Amino acid sequence: MATVGYTLMTEQAGPGDLVRWAARAEQTGFELLVSSDHYFPWLDSMGHAPNAWVTLGAVAQVTERAELMTYVTCPTMRYHPTVVAQQAATLGVLSNGRFTLGLGAGEALNEHVVGAGWPSANERQEMLAEAATIIRALFEGGYVNLAGDYFQVDSAKLWDLPPQPVPIGIAVSGQQSCELFAPLADVMIAVEPDPSLGPWWDAASGKAPARKVGQLPICWGPDRHECVQRAHELFRWFGGGWKVNAELPGTSGFDAASQFVRPEDVAESIPCGDSVEAVVKATSAFWEAGFTDVALVQIGGTEREQDRFFQAAPELIAALKESAG
């Protein structure tokens, strides 16, 4: 059966709110809680960027059933892969095995802070593949040594591991990334419902069809006009696409790149208002593309905006599960 998740959007809320909303999301019926991992918000108007790992540690203590996932962490620049492996293993222990480590090649927005420049897309993918190899080896429990093309590992070992290795998901966007990462991961992650991705991934993995997790932003509320304005204010950056979004180094760049995006443009790609049918229609593209999980993003970081969403959540979850078949 399809899984409907909730996104802990670290770019639009502080850590205390995110922890409270995670607990409420589980109580409301969401089965998966995914968290972004940012050093910057996309736009200044979003206003937040708490540490995702500290926040998820707290979330693990206020929830009991919902799965947890990073969506996604870049293990190549801000973090060394050995550090990501340790964080993931610890969270796996604290959550009693409910955590999946979602990895991605990163964005300049978050990784530029360490002053190491910003590699080409192909190099970033090669770095991610080497990092994932290191992390998977550490999850096996022994000592790991590596003199790689990008990373050095000297007698690393994880001393606290969950009973089962933490599953690894990797974000992909095309055939090249599917073929590179499917053999290294357990879960496919993507933000666009491209029906080609699943077959490419499954063919490259050589295993049974994989879990496939997508994400859909919505702006829920009773006043559609107000929702469109809020989505435009906070999420107009979304229209640039990930090939563009990965390259811009700061919030001013996203503001400039999205200055000509109109509210009506945002409304065409993001369901706004309180129509269950509109959310079902947007989500159906993921189900039809073979995705097994979709995590909703409620745009808006105030208590009122989230509260309205949680009130509607049981109906939304039921409708989305039914539409998945």
Image (spheres, grey):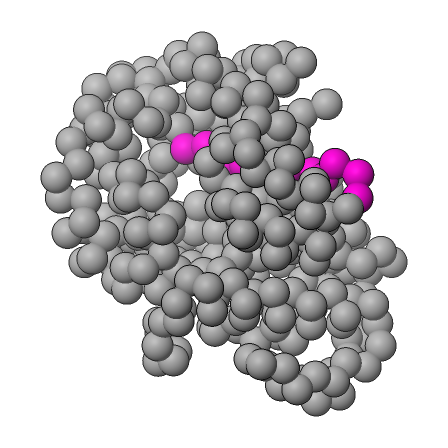
Give the quadrant of residue 229: top left
The percent position of residue 306, horizontal first and vertical second, equals 42, 32
Residue 249 in sight from this viewpoint: yes
Note whether residue 70 is visible.
no
Query: Which residue sits furthest right?
Result: 163
Q: Which residues are magenta?
A: 207-217
Work out which quarter of the rendered image holds the N terminus and state it.
top right
Which image quadrant for residue 183? Answer: bottom right
Work out whether 301 lies above or below 59.
above
Which of the two residues, 259 or 55, is positioned nearer the viewer here?
Answer: 259
Q: Residue furthest bottom?
A: 154
In terms of depth relative to the viewer, which is nearer, 247 or 178? 178
Q: Is residue 212 magenta?
A: yes
Give the left or right position of residue 135, taking residue 223 as reference. right
Magenta stretch: residue 161 in it? no
Residue visible at 79% across and 52% down?
A: 96
Residue 163, relative to residue 302: is it above or below?
A: below
